[in-house]
Amino acid sequence: MEGLKIPRHIGFIMDGNGRWAKQRKQPRNFGHIHGSNRIDEVVTACLDLGVECVSLYAFSTENWQRPKEEVDKICDILHKFLNQYAKKLIGNKIRLQISGDYTKFPKKIINLIEKRLEETKHFENRTLNIAINYGSKQEIVSAVNKLIESGKTCVTESDFASALYTANLPDIDLVVRTSGEQRVSNFFLWQIAYAELYFTPVLWPDFDKNELLKAIEWYSNRDRRYGKV
Ligand code: IPE
Ligand code: IPE
Ligand code: MG
């Protein structure tokens, strides 16, 4: 624990739910349920360590191409999570933020999201940023369109960053991807420009506080040079 460098912002690509279920001869949805049950432990451990912002990749713009039954189940899990997590967000002064066009989800999810956003918007120190119906390319294109609509013909990096979902957040310092895949799958491409990338074979439903500490220990030993010597 001593000498750990704590990232300000960690992004989790929570991958491997399906394979975790398959290993147990269970339907993929079984993995999604167990995966969602890991979130609280990991988020709590991050915030206890002093991480200011946690971003979770929960559903990508590409994930709509999965079978409808699986998408519906993920929606149910998301709804349940947003219901149960209200107490935690408010009790621990965590602001909820959503990255992605959440208006494409069923009405009851939209309503719940808007309720949670409203209830937590005044919390400034810690943020839980959930990426749903999120894709970085979509985000970048919509940022460009927003800037054009506002009348800009020339923009700075800071104008551009302000048009993203993460406008108010620091860039991501550490990306953790579970399940052994070594790719970023359209996850916050602008915001991870200088992030350290940690890949672990552990499947998301097995990712716990101990695994998080391993990732942060690894991060602490990285030399972030930002192009300097
Ligand atoms: C990640 O687990 C959860 C979502 C993408 C919603 P997967 O469902 O992708 O699990 P694998 O990759 O098939 O094992
Ligand atoms: C990335 O996982 C998206 C989420 C974790 C929500 P995927 O399983 O969808 O990514 P690919 O298809 O392996 O790149
Ligand atoms: Mg996957």
Image (spheres, helix red, strand yellow):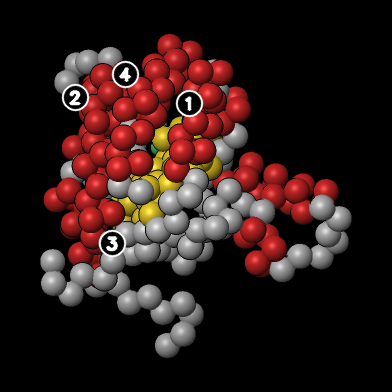
Task: Give the SS element for disc 2.
Answer: helix
The residue under label 2 is which amino acid type? Gln
Who's the residue at 46% across and 67% down the image? 194
Residue 29 in view of the camera: yes
Task: Give the SS element for disc 3.
Answer: loop
Q: Earlier in the sequence, mark 3 or mark 2?
A: 2
Corner quadrant of residue 80 = top left
Q: Which residue is under mark 2?
A: 23
Q: Which of marks 2 and 1 is nearer the N terminus?
A: 2
Q: Which residue is under mark 4?
A: 29
221 versus 113 height, above or below: below
The residue under label 4 is which amino acid type? Asn
Residue 50's tag is: 3
Q: Which of marks 3 and 4 is nearer the N terminus?
A: 4
Q: In this view, does 172 lie to the left or right of 17?
A: right
Who's the residue at 37% across and 47% down the image? 94
Label 1 residue near ligand 1, CB within 8 Å: no
10 Å crowding of disc 3: few (<14), some (14-19), many (20+): some
